[in-house]
Image (cartoon, rainbow, N blue to C red):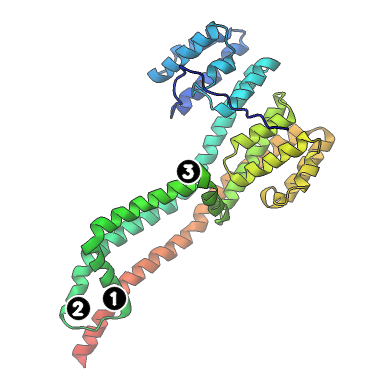
Amino acid sequence: MTKKSIYKKRKKGKPARLWGFPKERDYILENLALLLSAGMGVAEAANIVSSGLKSKQLKRVMAQVIEDVDSGSMLWKALSGSGIVGENYINLIKVGEESGRLVDNLRLIVAQQQKSRAFKAKLISAMSYPIIVFALMIIVGLGASWFMLPKILSSFSDMSVKVPLVTQVVMNFGTFLQNYGIIFVPTVLVGTLLFIYTFFVFRPFRFIGQSFLMWLPGVGSIIRDTEISRLGFVLGGLLESGLPVVEAVDYLENTSVYRPYTKLYAHLEDKINDGYSFQKSFESYKRTNKLIPVPIQQLLFAGERSGNFTDVLYKISEIYSEKVDASADNLSIIVEPILLFVVGLGVLIIGLSVILPIYTLVGSIGG
């Protein structure tokens, strides 16, 4: 059976995709849900929400949405391509309108968007400290090698002092920077940015950077815990909202950004669509145990058999959300000794390159 994408094409004349405004976009959905729950019509609720927006761009987008709704369009069609809500959430709004659970689904979308941003913020927070320290170390090291050390170490060459290997290497690097640094440093910087973009942002090759992150101690566990928490929260919410299991798993696949998990979810969708249970579907995938811990699998199987699948999914999400918080806090503790070692090694190299020639000079004078 051909898998139908949940994404909808952007209608002609619609505003371009919005970047930023996460809080105001959440404000739109939260207040839409609140006003609709009070029995207000969609167009009237959208007008009231639009009047409270600060962004002129969002006001223009909402004006187009209101115009579409007034002309008889369903809310999910009006929002599709607007940028107010991600295209991967449009199907959930459609299901909500068709099943009478629009308010619940709008709240679920807001909660999921906030949770996704929180997950990203935790990972960025855990990685920012080592990245900043490492970047400062490189800047200080380059500055010392480029401007300070060549002047200090050149005096030893003038005195015909035989310098040790480490001093010679530092001197040669400093000379290289003095001659070609204006080209070398920007080239390395641009190359590093291109490397990061290619392997961590650019979609066709992003899986390489993801594989590296999942291999890193500490970071890999945060990613796995985050994905398991996402699985529990998103799948539980979708099933509770009335979405069929196959469509819920397809939606889960499209909300995940890590290739190993999207491949697992695609496998689950195909197997469940063929009539297999979650247990049989998990067991038929080779890498399941690496991606989903065995105890979590057993919880899912027990929930599926007992009919409490949604409750089990929410419980898993709660447990692993707490694990993400703990792992993010522990990551800085793990990284600190490594950073201290790297910084200490750099200081040792620079210190030896300066001190060893001095000992050689003093020894030659004493001799």
Residue 234 in view, yes or no: no
Q: Amino acid at mark 2?
A: Phe
* Depth check, front residue: 358 or 89: 89
Circle 3 Cα neighbour tier, 10 Å, few/some/many (<14 / 14–19 / ≥20): some
Counting from the top left corner in percent of width and height, residue 259 is at 60, 45
Query: Label 3 is placed on what type of residue?
Result: Phe
Three-letter amino acid code of the residue under disc 1: Thr
Q: Is residue 274 visible to the viewer in this orientation of the structure? A: yes
* Residue at 69% from the left image edge and 47% from the top image edge: 292
Tell me how far mark 2 sits from mark 1, CA to CA: 10 Å
Under circle 2, the secondary element is helix
| Circles 3, 1 touching at the beta carbon (< 8 Å) | no
Q: Work out whether mark 2 precedes mark 1 in sequence or the reverse, and give the earlier one.
A: 2
Q: Which mark is residue 202?
A: 3
Residue, disc 2: 156
Whether residue 302 is situated above or below residue 161 in the rendered picture = above
Residue 235 left/right relative to 162: right
Q: Nearer the viewer, residue 362 or 244?
A: 244
On the rendered structure, is 71 left or right of 355? right
Dot 1 alpha-carbon crowd within 10 angstroms: few under 14, some 14 to 19, many 20 or more: many
- Tell me, for residue 56, which label it has, or none: none
Q: Which mark identifies residue 167?
A: 1
Q: Position of residue 13 (x, y in %)?
A: 45, 16
